[in-house]
Structure formats: structure tokens, C-alpha cells
Image (cartoon, rainbow, N blue to C red):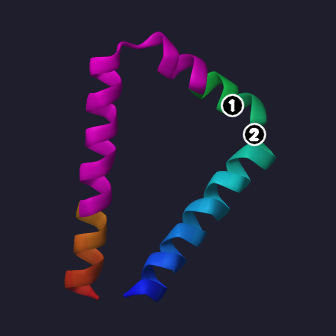
Amino acid sequence: MIETLIMGLGLVLVIEGLALALAPSRIEEALAFLSAIGPERRRALGLAALAVGVTVLWGVRVLG
């Protein structure tokens, strides 16, 4: 269990690092977009991302 958690955290860091290394200006655009929308919409976006992530992990666990 802990190994899977550490691997997941490592994968997140790899993806974040790639985004920052390969497209730093796009990160600035994304941050500007997020600051332009209201807090309720940001919350909804975060909850949607959370739901998709949990669904993907559940699907992998059930099907795998």
C-alpha cells in the first residue's frame, strides 16, 4: 500500500516537473485563468478533477 502511494506521488511530481520544464509560459496562462475565475468555479473544477481521479483509480483497481 505505501509503495503504491509513493509511486503515485512520484508520478505526480514527474508530470508536474515536465509541465514546468517544457511549458513554463503555459503554466503562467493556466494560473492567470484560475485567478480570473471565481472561487466557487475553482472549487467546482477541483471537485470535478477529484471525482475523475477517484473514478480512474477505482476503475484501475476493479479492472486490474
Q: Please, what is the three-letter code of the amino acid marked with disc 1?
A: Arg
In reply to whether residue 35 is colored magenta, the answer given is yes
Residue 18 position within the rendered picture, expressed as x and y whole percent measured from the top left = 72, 54
Seen as rendered, the residue at the extreme right is 21
Residue 54 position within the rendered picture, expressed as x and y whole percent measured from the top left = 26, 61
- Left or right of 42 in this view: 25: right
Question: How many C-alpha atoms fall within 10 Å of the one at disc 1: few (<14), some, or many (≥20)?
Answer: few
- Left or right of 20 in this view: 43: left
Image quarter for residue 28? top right
Which residue is pictured at 62% across the width and 61% down the height? Answer: 13
Is the C terminus in the top left, top right, bottom left or bottom right quadrant?
bottom left
Seen as rendered, the residue at the extreme front is 2
Q: Please, what is the three-letter code of the amino acid marked with disc 2?
A: Ala
- Left or right of 43 in this view: 27: right
Magenta segment boundaries in residue numbering: 31-54
Which residue is pictured at 75% across the width and 39% down the height? Answer: 23
User: Badge 1 is on which residue?
Assistant: 26
Considering only vertical position in the picture, is 27 above or below 4? above
